[in-house]
Amino acid sequence: MVSSARRIAALWFPRLPTDRLRRRWLRHPPPDWGLPLVIVAKQDNAMRLTAVDRRAADLGLAPGMALASARAMVPAVKVMAANAPADLRLLEKIADWCDSFTPLVALDAPCGLLLDVTGASHLFDGEQAMLDRLRRALKKQGFAVAGALAGTALAARALARYRDGTVVPPGRDSEAVSTLPVEALDLDPVTVHAFRRAGLKTVGQVAGRRRAELTARFGSGMVFALDTALGRADLPISPRLPLPDYRAERRFAEPVTDEKTMLATLNLLAGRLGKNLEERGEGARALQAVFFRADGSIRRLAVQTGAPTREPALIERLFREKLDALADPLDPGFGFDLIRLEADRTEPCRDEAAALGSETVPQKEIRALVDRLTARFGAHRVLSFEPRDTHIPENAFAAVPAQYARAGRLGWEKMRSAGEAPCRPLRLLAPEPVSLIGGEAFRWRHVTHRIRKLEGPERIAMEWWRDAAPDRDYYRAEDENGRRFWLYREQGLHWFLHGVFA
């Protein structure tokens, strides 16, 4: 028997494709929206029904029926083509909403979800109340839904399809599943037909046969599925989203719509996270705020920091910048009934570095400014230059997001002493060809510059393991007007201008 600690809730949406269309038609109803609705797809070289709404089911139509037979039974029927990608997107949206009950949500495609609610039911006044709340809220959103809760995923899944609303006490999975038909095990049709022919119509009758006999006839996979359904084995679910390192949330008895209240809530949740982070000597680098709307919609906002932080005021300020910069404003609709703050990435953070690192006050202020600008404009628009370990001028630096810039072992080399003219130009250009005139002048951008002073050459060899370009001989040149240029000669023939001095 598996541990009774694990508790899995299964949700089944038997009319998900038709529910998707009916929900859309509430806003833009077609002329014939009142007819019975069926979804069809080509199967075995014939158009067959893959889903039907309640009206069509009441008239005797069912999935698997040929479209021609369905039309013969019910001539006035609305037929729509199956759209599996759209159904999957809707299922993922429902899974997002279910995150408000537990972060461990797995897809059971094409029309089901599995929720690991271990240790979460006490937040909803018990398992039965939690399951009822899930089903009631989803039905209110326009979905036909059935659900059950048990100790294993397969047991909960089977009960959701055949015993809607069942909550199995810990350790009682075998008793609850034994009376179900063999189809509840979700086996292939050939195996189910073989059981039926042998007179084994329920899961309990199959479980009564010897394991060696079942394994020899149907394989170990079927036996493992049987043991899982009976609670004798366990197969963990695979959550669709990774668990955050830390999280805090607040539920509201009445949905909130005011932005000030939302920001104040984020500040409160940031304080809770900060205490947990401080206990473990860590700070957050990436945070995400999740807003669960009363109608099932969800919005997620993510921010990042340049250094580990657990300062609530800073976190609130970053999310305020994010909210102000949204192209699509955060629409509360009828209000948010749950706000969650997650720390998706953390790093060690010393006490003296809790706010924004151990730098001096000006450096902290710069980092805070970078974080705010990044939250408003995006990391790809706030850049910083970092030195690179190379002597090739155009490769000696790289523009990186300022939040990720770090002072490593490399630094900008000191090229001159105090009072000495700079060896490198302040403005580096892409190499541009120039024409040398008699060794006393050069022509650049259709302008002739007469050389008054020339210093060089300085040989810079190319990195043979990266670039097969020839070596360069660099010169600092000053023209008759006092303007200074950085020139180089390649292969002794071609001249280029690579930069200008102040």
Image (cartoon, grey):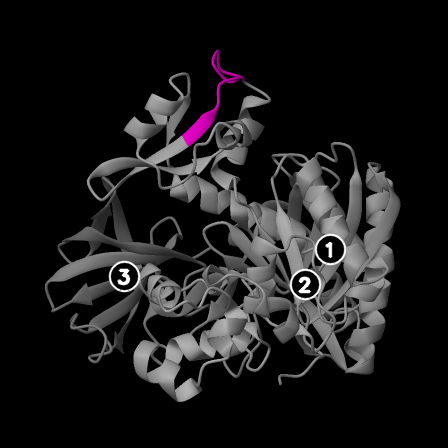
Magenta part of the chain: 29-38
Query: Chief secondary structure of the magenta span?
Result: loop
- The tag on residue 487 is 3
Does dot 1 land on a helix, a strand or a loop?
helix
For badge 1, the amino acid type reads: Leu
Q: Are marks 2 and 1 in contact (CB under 8 Å)?
A: yes
> Residue most toward the front?
199
433 shown above or below 327: below
The residue closer to the viewer here, 106 or 263, is 106
The residue at the point 19 percent across, 74 percent down is: 471
Q: How many marks?
A: 3
For badge 2, the amino acid type reads: Leu
Tell me which corner region of the image, top left, top right, bottom left or bottom right, holds residue 233: bottom right
Question: Which is more N-terminal, label 1 or label 2?
Answer: 1
For badge 3, the amino acid type reads: Leu
Residue 358 showing in the rendered view: no
Residue 163 position, x and y percent, is: 63, 55
Question: Which is more N-terminal, label 3 or label 2?
Answer: 2
Q: Residues within 10 Å of mark 2 (few under 14, many from 20)?
A: many
Q: The N terminus appears in which quarter of the rendering?
A: bottom right
Does dot 2 land on a helix, a strand or a loop?
strand
The residue at the point 79 percent across, 37 percent down is: 335
Q: Is residue 237 left or right of residue 485?
A: right
- The tag on residue 131 is 1
Q: Residues within 10 Å of mark 3 (few under 14, many from 20)?
A: many
Residue 488 position, x and y percent, is: 24, 64
Residue at numbered disc 2: 149
